[in-house]
Image: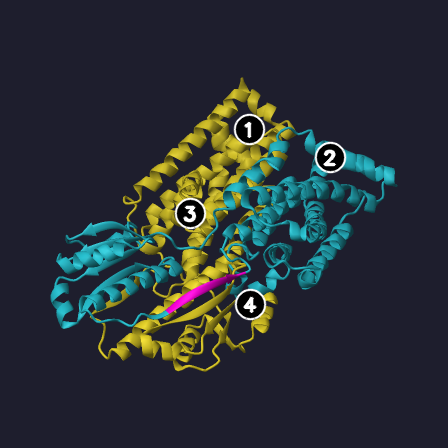
């Protein structure tokens, strides 16, 4: 026990005598959460939408007014001139154009059907599909209103929708828990990924190896200080999430901290493992940065919902720890899901953590012999 | 002078490639990621889990459920006729939407006042709206059919995707991810470089040589620039072969712009390296900057959605401009004149970081 405390003390001293790194470790997650909490959104605001309606038809007018009222669109009337429209697209002045034929209204009266065309700048397919979905949703709503008016009776079956957990549909509520898991995963892994590699490079690892310390004691000594650091990080970013971004926390705090501890341990042991298998600091850093950064951002479900991915990619994403943690904390924070319901995700995290811890101790032991 | 530069470059190449673990990390892992992740990024909503709570259990309600089930995007996960709190299914995350058919659904249908309630999990606002809209359309249609009112077919929306007619996400994402990977590796290698020499002590050996500051910096930039261009070439080949992305139209522009871009990001890496005291500091600093570059590049979430101060920050993000140029070249078939504005900004940023790198580096230390 005394030996263990000694290694922990040593590790803490390593951390404290580099105040600049310590500052970075505390400040980075906070600054990043503040920046990305505001900047990473998938709702569109002020999309430049051009409208081509030569005849100024009432139907189109009303639809455009509805679109404008959503606050998502900035409407510009465009002349019916192919070249000019194309030019506006090329220069990036507009992202979409709604084109109405001259006889939308007469067709509607005569045959009950008509057509509108939406031209989209699909060179950014993500933006294009968000815009298309917005226009479609609003056209549907508009259609309902028009039918009600035309048939002069309300539809036989009406639909009332209630939006739960995020009634104002704020995308920050979706992304902030995602940011917590991505930042936590990456920072925690980076922190420990260099510790053993660094000692190897400096040669001080030999001193540890000839000491009477058990491998697990050395690992615990390395993990513990960073665990405390990560706790501080979780506390500060959750505090910001709630105070600055008004993200609700409806679930159980104990469950949240329990799963977060598990997840931090997972990331820290992954770091230790990387550190153990790498021959130098450089390769350890490269592995934990280049190897982890993009897969964690893209495959964790942080920005792109996992269930919309191709089935093969869904399987691949199963190895990304942040994916499972994210499901749990979104559930706890936003929906108030009981932790027992999320047993599958917690179990996966637990298995991953034990596996990584076991492997990191084992690789360290092999070095001993 | 030239000989000095060549020798320095040779040294850097040797240092990178003699490390066996480096080779797969520079030339295998990034491209595996490119292949896997290139397919992964999409906002398309194609899976909506709907749970049905049917209190009516009549012929009509079953017909309605069948209609809902027939929609491609919708998966019926639960079909309950039983009790329990419907909203709990959302809390427990077994469904995105719960559709509740009331007990007197069929009677109300004949009098014309039936109501179907949707409980929507709105954590993902976009998906929630789209899902609700799908269901609203089906349910309303169903209602009109039941009372055999010929509902006016209404206005259909047909979309035309300009510049990318088949709406291929990979045409946008693959070049973007390639840019990110090159940036990651470039900034990483350079930001570690000088600080490592300092940590290992070899910087003193370089300091006592007659090599000038500019040769020193060039000797660091050029090798990593060549590695970056090599990675770009492999990546473009993958983009062409596996993703059939049309790269040949603008190959000259792509390489020209890449050189300017690489000067900027590599110089930024060197800048981080010179101002950092240890490799750890350099690692965390470059990580911090890279995550900002990546998440605020407009690749994953549109710049148009960002608040104006964040949009202003993206102007200083070289990744944004590079992605914008590549996108215009590959998808819009743009020539030099159409990428000029972004190119000017990118060059400005590159010059800025190159100057900063040279100024910050003091040969001989202080």
Discs 4/1, front: 4
Discs 2/1, front: 2
Marks 3 and 2 belong to one chain: no
Label 4 to label 1: alpha-carbon separation:
45 Å
Look at the numbered disc 3 and give the secondary structure of its residue: loop
A61 w.r.t. B220: above or below? below
Disc number for residue A309: 3
Look at the numbered disc 2 and give the secondary structure of its residue: helix
Image x and y of residue B93, in percent: 30, 50
Q: Which chain is yellow?
A: A
Look at the numbered disc 4 and give the secondary structure of its residue: helix
Chain B on-screen colour? cyan
* Magenta highlight range: B156-162
Label 1 to label 3: alpha-carbon separation:
32 Å
Tell me the quarter of the picture where residue A158 sits.
bottom left
CB under 8 Å between discs 2 and 1: no
Residue with the mark numbered 2: B13
Discs 1/3, front: 3
Is B196 left or right of B72, judged from the image as shown?
Answer: right
Label 4 to label 3: alpha-carbon separation:
31 Å
Label 3 to label 2: alpha-carbon separation:
39 Å
Magenta segment includes B152: no
Residue with the mark numbered 4: B308
Q: Residue sitting at 19 percent across and 69 percent down?
A: B148
């Amino acid at each position: 026990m005394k030996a263990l405390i000694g290694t922990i003390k040593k590790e803490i001293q390593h951390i404290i005598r580099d105040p600049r790194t310590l500052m970075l470790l505390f400040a980075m997650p906070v600054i990043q959460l503040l920046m990305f909490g505001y900047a990473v959104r998938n709702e569109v605001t002020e999309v430049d939408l051009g409208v081509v309606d030569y005849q100024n038809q009432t139907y189109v007018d009303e639809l455009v007014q509805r679109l404008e009222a959503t606050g998502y669109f900035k409407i510009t009337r465009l002349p019916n001139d192919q070249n000019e429209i194309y030019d506006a697209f090329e220069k990036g002045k507009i992202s979409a154009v709604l084109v109405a034929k001259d006889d939308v209204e007469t067709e509607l009266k005569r045959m009950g059907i008509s057509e509108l065309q939406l031209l989209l700048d699909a060179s950014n397919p993500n933006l294009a599909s968000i815009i298309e979905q917005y226009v479609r949703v609003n056209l549907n709503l508009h259609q309902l209103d028009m039918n009600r008016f035309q048939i002069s009776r309300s539809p036989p079956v009406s639909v009332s929708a209630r939006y739960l957990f995020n009634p104002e549909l704020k995308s920050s509520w979706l992304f902030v828990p995602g940011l917590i898991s991505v930042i936590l995963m990456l920072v925690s892994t980076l922190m420990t990924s260099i510790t053993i590699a660094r000692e190897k490079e400096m040669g001080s690892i030999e001193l540890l190896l000839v000491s009477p310390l058990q491998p697990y004691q050395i690992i615990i000594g390395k993990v513990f200080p960073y665990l405390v650091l990560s706790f501080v990080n979780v506390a500060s970013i959750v505090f910001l999430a709630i105070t600055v971004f008004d993200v609700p926390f409806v679930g159980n705090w104990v469950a949240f901290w329990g799963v977060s501890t598990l997840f931090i341990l997972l990331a820290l042991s992954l770091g230790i493992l990387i550190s153990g298998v790498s021959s130098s600091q450089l390769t350890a850093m490269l592995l934990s940065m280049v190897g982890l950064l993009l897969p964690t951002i893209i495959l964790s479900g942080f920005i792109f919902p996992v269930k919309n991915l191709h089935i093969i990619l869904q399987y691949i994403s199963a190895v990304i720890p942040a994916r499972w943690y994210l499901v749990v904390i979104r559930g706890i924070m936003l929906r108030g899901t009981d932790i027992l319901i999320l047993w599958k995700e917690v179990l996966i995290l637990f298995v991953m953590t034990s596996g990584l811890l076991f492997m990191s101790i084992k690789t360290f032991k092999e070095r001993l012999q | 002078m030239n000989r000095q530069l060549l020798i320095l470059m040779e040294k850097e190449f040797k240092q990178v490639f003699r490390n066996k673990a480096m080779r797969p990390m520079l030339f295998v892992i990034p491209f595996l990621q490119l292949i896997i992740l290139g397919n992964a990024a999409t906002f398309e909503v194609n899976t909506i889990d709907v749970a049905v709570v049917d209190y009516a259990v009549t012929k009509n309600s079953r017909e309605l459920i069948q209609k809902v089930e027939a929609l491609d995007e919708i998966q019926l996960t639960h079909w309950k006729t039983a009790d329990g709190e419907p909203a709990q299914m959302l809390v427990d995350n077994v469904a995105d939407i719960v559709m509740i058919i009331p007990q007197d659904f069929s009677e109300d249908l004949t009098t014309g006042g039936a109501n179907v309630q949707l409980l929507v999990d709105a954590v993902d606002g976009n998906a929630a709206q789209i899902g609700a809209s799908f269901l609203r359309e089906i349910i309303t249609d169903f209602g009109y059919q039941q009372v055999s009112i010929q509902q006016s077919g209404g206005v259909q929306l047909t979309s035309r995707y300009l510049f990318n007619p088949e709406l291929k996400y990979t045409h946008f994402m693959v070049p973007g991810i390639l840019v990110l990977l090159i940036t990651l590796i470039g900034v990483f290698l350079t930001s570690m470089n000088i600080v490592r020499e300092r940590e290992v002590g070899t910087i003193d050996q370089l300091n006592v040589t007659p090599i000038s500051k500019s040769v020193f910096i060039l000797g660091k930039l050029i090798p990593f620039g060549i590695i970056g261009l090599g990675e770009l070439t492999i990546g473009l080949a993958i983009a062409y072969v596996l993703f059939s992305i049309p790269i040949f139209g603008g190959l000259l522009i792509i390489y020209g712009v890449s050189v300017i871009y690489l000067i900027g990001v590599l110089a930024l890496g060197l800048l981080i390296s010179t101002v950092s005291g240890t490799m750890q500091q350099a690692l965390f600093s470059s990580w911090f900057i890279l995550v900002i570059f990546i998440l605020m590049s407009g690749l994953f979430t549109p710049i148009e959605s960002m608040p104006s101060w964040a949009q202003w920050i993206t102007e200083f993000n070289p990744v944004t401009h590079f992605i914008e140029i590549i996108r215009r070249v590959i998808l819009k078939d743009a020539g030099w004149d159409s990428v000029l504005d972004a190119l000017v900004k990118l060059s400005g940023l590159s010059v800025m970081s190159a100057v900063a790198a040279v100024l910050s580096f003091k040969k001989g230390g202080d």
